[in-house]
Amino acid sequence: MASDPKKYPVRYGSNIQGRFFLCAALFLWMIMAPYALWAFDLQRIEAPQAAAKLNDLIVLDARPQKQWQQGHIPGAISFCWENYTRTDTEGVRWRIFPPEELAKALGDLGVSHMDAVLVYGDADTSWGGEGWLVWAMAWLGHQGPVYFLDGGIQSWRENKQPTVSDASPQRNPVEYQVNVQPQFNINATKLAKTPGQFTIIDTRNYLTEWLPGHIPGAIHIPWEKFYQGPNRRILSPDALKSLLEKNKVDLKKPVVYYCSGGIRSGFTWLVHQFSGLKAAINFEGGTEEWVKEHPYN
């Protein structure tokens, strides 16, 4: 005899609800999986440890190509922001290439989204371009580990590691898959429409850039304050927190760093990432974008 479902109302209803919630969970997982499973693997590394891992890494030199030609880590590929930014159709200078175009550039150099990458610079000639490059890879959704060489090329040489001036070995082109992470960037329109929602830090020069005009409500901390010593090593987490507290930075709000075109602020964003604080945002368009929509008085 067939069972009468009316005799088992709880069990019968639970099966239907269970199936419904299972289907709903699977649907949400399909939608959110690309985002939930992604986490930017950024690690600070010293020169000796980087040298020991060199054969397993793709090395990107963020300095201008002239400095790269004069001497670089063996196998390093030149990848300076100067070659991957341009003036956009609105006349905003130093805009980063669109994600797909930047991904193609990396892929053509033999860099895939899954590769382990070492990034270095000198926090000097590149205007902190190594930070911009690390930020760009986070924005693109890079899935492999990214190692930042603290102390840059100076630390590498100080540790008596070799440098070369020959061309990097040619790598076969590969596919670089983009999974853009919009939480790492912001635009002028959103900043203007949400006054008071963010803590905004201006990293430009005081006399020639900040005083002539800046984003309303911004706090001025020049980017040079975010590194120290002859090798221009990034601030420790405690030192960064002390710097931000000294300048009355409200850390209860998301922190947005900006400069003229996202390069110096990319470096300060990088330092912030190692601090243990909530992830920061780099306003890539900077004052170049801001003044197009909101001219200074």
Image (tube, rainbow, N blue to C red):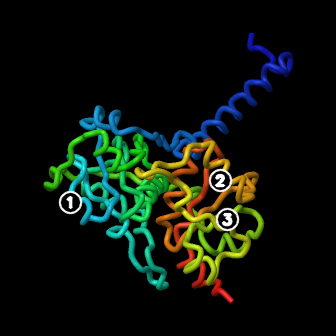
Q: Which of 279/151 is in front?
A: 151
Q: Which element type, helix, strand or loop, lies under badge 1?
A: helix
Q: Earlier in the sequence, mark 2 or mark 3?
A: 3
Q: CA distance from mark 2 to mark 1?
A: 35 Å
Q: Which of 147/27 is in front?
A: 147
Name the residue that disc number 3 marks: 200
Q: Is residue 193 above or below residue 110?
A: below
Name the residue that disc number 1 marks: 70
Q: Residues within 10 Å of mark 3 (few under 14, many from 20)?
A: many
Which quarter of the rendering shows the C terminus? bottom right
Single out the residue that lies furthest toward the front: 230
Q: Amino acid at mark 3?
A: Ile
For marks 2 and 3, give the one nearer the viewer: 2
Q: At which x and y percent is residue 241? A: 66, 48
Q: Earlier in the sequence, mark 3 or mark 1?
A: 1
Q: Which element type, helix, strand or loop, lies under badge 3?
A: strand
Q: Residue at x 47, y 65 (%)?
A: 263
Which numbered disc covers residue 243? 2
Q: Amino acid at mark 2?
A: Leu
Marks 2/3 in contact by CB < 8 Å: the verdict is no
Q: Which of 46/136 is in front?
A: 46
Which numbered disc covers residue 188? none
Q: At which x and y percent is residue 291? A: 59, 83
Q: Amino acid at mark 1?
A: Gln
Quadrant housing residue 128 = bottom left
Q: CA distance from mark 2 to mark 3?
A: 15 Å
Side of 165 where 232 appears, left or right: right
